[in-house]
Image: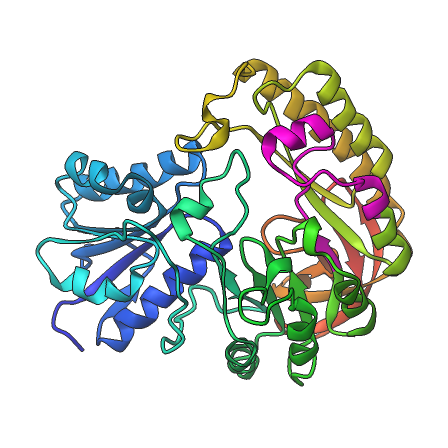
């Protein structure tokens, strides 16, 4: 163990960023350091802050953490999206920070920690997953994320990800399967596949979308109970992939596919694919029994008229999505939409968001109430002494969806898969018993 080397870790951002944080933790621990998520610990002299810069609010949270650690007199290493987005500008503004590491340069985290001043932020990011690094998981529970690819080849009008992460880079099937087996050996029951766009998986390695082939191999792993896929893209949702959902028993019938809008003119301005979304969703529901569909939409994109918003509202009302999130458009520099006019006011964006969320709350309540007296398959997350277990159904992804609260006198353990009967519900959660 390196003398007086307890490294504090602060994590911001999405699940993809979480995997990067865990990779850096693994590198630091392999180099002989101890790590802690309690960056305020007085024994911690050095803090690594992995930042998010996808939208303005995420940047504010990351900056808040940086200034908090500066005030506490810590040595600070800033990693991830914030330095990648602002590069040399951030270096000049935050002169108190000892090191900056870009999204594609996390392999240098040990050098950054051991240097008085360190700067490595690639001008042209090209993320390659460090296959030789074993992640040190921040949370060890029933589920774990596996990053199957990084970067993006699309150029959506509002998105900075291609600038922050580079072109699409898939990991090899055998490397992903190896990691999944390792997680299964640690007791993980559910693996969650993530990428900026999971449905393009393998297009760079195998010359065609190959998520179905990856799912086929992962489905063979004995100790894995559930395989969940997030962040699908409609363009590459092939019939082979639909068949994988239908036929592979461990692939949960949960499709997370951000559609972003319903109106063809808004989608065109967003540089998103213009497809018959209603036909697409109905086809998924027709072919995949009991499929749960989660989507997200953006309101207030530049030029969004009342007519275009009403189209979105009525689309949500008609399609009755199982899960739905709404974001207010965030104007980001170096994106196509940055200079689009006219801008929608903050007041209107907020009102439109709340209107759709209110509608979805009604849809979700009606849907959840329909489960009363029915059995649902759940994965146990936590078990409390008072006879209450906190679980998720197959219809619920971690952190973004609801929970199932199970009343039982039986002995349950985290990661266990159980069938529970629903006895009550609200708009977000289910109450059940064994």
Whether 247 is drawn above or below 263: the answer is below
Residue 65, horizontal then vertical, whole percent: 30, 42
Magenta region: 254-281
Q: Is residue 403 visible in this depiction of the protein? A: no
Q: Is residue 197 left or right of residue 393?
A: left
Residue furthest left as drawn: 116
Q: Is residue 131 above or below residue 339?
A: below
Which quarter of the figure has residue 262?
Answer: top right
Query: Residue furthest toward the front?
Result: 207
Where does the image place residue 318, in percent across and percent down from the top left? Answer: 86, 33
Q: How is the image coloured?
A: rainbow
Q: Is residue 118 visible?
A: yes
Q: Quadrant of the N terminus?
A: bottom left
* Position of residue 146 measured from the top left corner of the image (x, y, whole percent): 53, 67
Above-or-below relation of 350 to 63: above
Image quarter of residue 108: bottom left
Front-most of 297 and 396? Answer: 297
Judge by depth and name the residue closer to the eye, 402 or 271. Answer: 271
- 302 horizontally vs 276: left or right: left
Relative height, residue 182 to residue 266 (above, below): below
Choose between 274 and 136: the one closer to the eye. 274
Instruction: State the quadrant of the C terminus.
Output: bottom right
Image quadrant assignment for residue 272: top right
Examine the structure image and report whether residue 274 is included in the region drawn in magenta: yes
Q: Residue drawn 59% across and 21% down?
A: 350
Question: Residue shown at 44%/62% (left/top)?
Answer: 19
Report the side of 378 relative to 342 (left or right).
Answer: right
Tell me if residue 97 is in the magenta stretch. no
Residue 79 screen position, x and y as percent: 29, 52
């Amino acid at each position: 163990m390196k003398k007086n080397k307890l490294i504090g870790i602060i994590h911001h951002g999405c699940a993809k960023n979480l995997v990067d944080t865990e990779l850096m933790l693994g590198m630091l621990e392999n180099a002989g350091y101890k790590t802690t998520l309690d960056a305020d610990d007085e024994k911690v002299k050095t803090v690594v802050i992995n930042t998010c810069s996808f939208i303005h609010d995420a940047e504010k949270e990351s900056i808040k953490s940086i200034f908090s650690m500066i005030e506490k007199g810590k040595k600070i290493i800033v990693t991830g999206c914030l330095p990648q987005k602002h590069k040399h500008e951030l270096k000049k503004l935050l002169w108190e920070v000892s090191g900056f590491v870009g999204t594609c340069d996390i392999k240098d985290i040990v050098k950054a920690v051991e240097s008085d001043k360190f700067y490595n932020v690639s001008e042209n990011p090209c993320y390659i997953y460090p296959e030789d690094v074993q992640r040190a998981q921040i949370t060890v529970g029933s589920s774990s994320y596996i990053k199957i690819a990084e970067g993006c080849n699309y150029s959506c009008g509002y998105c900075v990800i291609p600038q922050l992460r580079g072109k699409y880079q898939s990991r090899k099937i055998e490397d992903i399967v190896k990691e999944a087996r390792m997680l299964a050996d640690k007791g993980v029951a559910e693996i969650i596949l993530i990428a900026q766009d999971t449905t393009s998986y393998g297009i760079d390695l195998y010359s065609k979308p190959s998520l179905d082939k990856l799912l086929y191999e992962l489905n063979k792993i004995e100790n894995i109970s559930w395989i969940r896929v997030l962040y699908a893209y409609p363009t590459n949702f092939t019939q082979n992939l639909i068949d994988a959902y239908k036929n592979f028993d461990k692939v949960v019938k949960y499709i997370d596919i951000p559609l972003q809008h319903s109106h063809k003119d808004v989608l065109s301005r967003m540089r998103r694919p213009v497809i018959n979304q209603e036909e697409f969703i109905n086809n998924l529901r027709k072919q995949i029994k009991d499929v749960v569909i989660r989507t997200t939409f953006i309101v207030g994109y530049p030029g969004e008229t009342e007519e275009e918003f009403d189209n979105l509202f009525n689309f949500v009302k008609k399609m009755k999505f199982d899960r739905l999130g709404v974001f207010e458009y965030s104007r980001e520099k170096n994106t196509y939409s940055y200079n689009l006019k006219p801008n929608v006011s903050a007041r209107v964006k907020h009102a439109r968001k709340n209107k759709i969320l209110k509608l979805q709350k009604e849809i979700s309540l009606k849907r959840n109430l329909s489960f009363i007296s029915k059995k649902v398959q759940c994965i146990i997350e936590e078990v409390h002494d008072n006879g209450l277990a906190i679980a998720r159904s197959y219809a619920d992804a971690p952190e973004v969806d609801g929970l199932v609260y199970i009343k039982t006198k039986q002995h349950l353990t985290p990661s266990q898969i159980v069938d529970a009967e629903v006895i009550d519900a609200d708009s977000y959660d289910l109450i059940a018993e064994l």
